[in-house]
Image: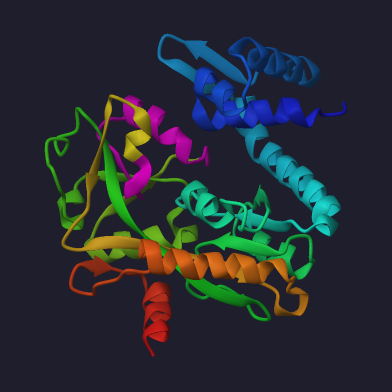
């Protein structure tokens, strides 16, 4: 069958949110129109992708199998559009990373008339982003560069350090605390969006503080967290402190202190294919670092993984 990308996008957004109302709002559709798109996709595939029950919306086995290829299909479509438009001055950017939540960063870098115009897509992971940069299908990538990653021939710049917090169900024994230290999380399984060996930041965090990470067996994306913690209130998740609990009343976002873990975001680009528009993006980065303290770090209060420690030390030289 010929897949309609609008139908695929409706499915992926609903799968990420596990809430048809929020997915429809994000896509600027009515809930009825979203449901119709997903129904047409299911009809063409000949399988059901979602199940609705009293607990909410969840993916079927076929839906879980379809989700990752569907994401890659949307990425390919977005990159094709960005490549076609590249001649009119837009920077083609891809983002990656299950813990990144890049919207605030992208808004700051692309906002206003003086900002560069960005065409933004999503890469599956850092190797995909590196491959896209080397193939010249994108101009710049945004995400966390893990320890030991092969970024040779590419320029890299750490641009932001985000404080991390823990999110728990209001029924969790730790939910009444105003603040928590990382060591307070011992005994609480931490949800992982992928196997721990592929998550450099969380692997170092868990190992540093003697914590337990638990992967559910399939990567359903970070917007799976509200559903997961509703179903399994004994677990918790580590997320950026600016999330505000996803707006869910059954969740509490609690700051982590003594120390506060910081998650680093970097820009990557190919010096051999550097476009003039990238200079405008880097000027925006400089302004945000000065005005919004994007790289604020205090070794007495903060915890950094090894990669970010090296980057911060290089900046201070």
Q: Is residue 197 above or below residue 290?
A: above
- The residue sitting at 74% across, 60% down in the picture is 138
- The residue positioned 50% from the left and 23% from the top of the image is 22
Horizontal placement of 40 versus 166: left or right? right
284 displayed left or right of 262: right
Please name the residue shown 56% across and 70% down the image: 283
Measuring from the top left, give residue 37's x and y in whole percent.
71, 18
Apparent side of residue 256 relative to residue 244 in the rendered image (left or right): left
Q: Is residue 294 above or below residue 88?
A: below
The part of the chain drawn in magenta is 218-243
* Residue 26 among magenta residues: no
224 magenta-colored:
yes
Residue 164 position in % (x across, y down)? 31, 54
Which x, y percent locates residue 202?
38, 58
| Quadrant for the C terminus in the image | bottom left
| Rendered location of residue 256, percent (x, y) | 22, 53
Does residue 253 appear in the picture of this structure? yes
In the displayed structure, 140 sits above or below 246; it is below
Q: Is residue 186 left or right of residue 316?
A: left
Q: Is residue 294 visible?
A: no
């Amino acid at each position: 069958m010929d897949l309609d990308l609008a139908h695929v996008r409706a499915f992926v957004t609903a799968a990420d949110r596990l809430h048809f109302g929020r997915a429809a709002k994000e896509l600027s559709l009515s809930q009825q129109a979203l449901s119709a798109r997903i129904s047409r996709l299911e009809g063409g595939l000949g399988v059901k992708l979602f199940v609705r029950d009293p607990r909410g919306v969840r993916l079927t086995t076929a839906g879980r199998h379809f989700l990752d290829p569907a994401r890659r299909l949307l990425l390919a479509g977005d990159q094709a559009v960005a490549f076609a438009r590249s001649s009119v001055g837009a920077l083609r950017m891809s983002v990656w990373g299950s813990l990144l939540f890049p919207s605030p960063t992208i808004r700051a870098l692309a906002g206003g008339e003086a900002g560069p115009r960005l065409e933004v897509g999503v890469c599956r992971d850092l190797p995909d982003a590196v491959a896209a940069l080397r193939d010249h299908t994108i101009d710049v990538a945004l995400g966390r560069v893990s320890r030991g990653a092969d970024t040779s021939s590419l320029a890299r710049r750490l641009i932001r350090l985000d404080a991390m917090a823990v999110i728990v169900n209001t029924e969790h024994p730790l939910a009444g605390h105003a603040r928590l230290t990382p060591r307070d999380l011992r005994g609480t399984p931490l949800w992982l969006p992928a196997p721990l060996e592929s998550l450099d930041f969380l692997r170092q965090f868990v190992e540093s503080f003697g914590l337990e990470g638990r992967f559910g067996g399939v990567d359903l994306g970070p917007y799976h967290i509200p559903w997961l913690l509703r179903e399994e209130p004994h677990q918790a998740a580590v997320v950026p402190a600016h999330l505000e609990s996803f707006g869910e009343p059954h969740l509490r976002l609690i700051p982590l202190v003594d120390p506060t873990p910081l998650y680093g975001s970097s820009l990557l680009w190919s010096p051999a294919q550097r476009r003039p528009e990238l200079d405008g993006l880097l000027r925006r980065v400089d302004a945000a670092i000065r005005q919004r303290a994007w790289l604020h770090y205090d070794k007495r209060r903060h915890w950094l993984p090894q990669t970010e420690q090296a980057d911060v030390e290089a900046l201070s030289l």
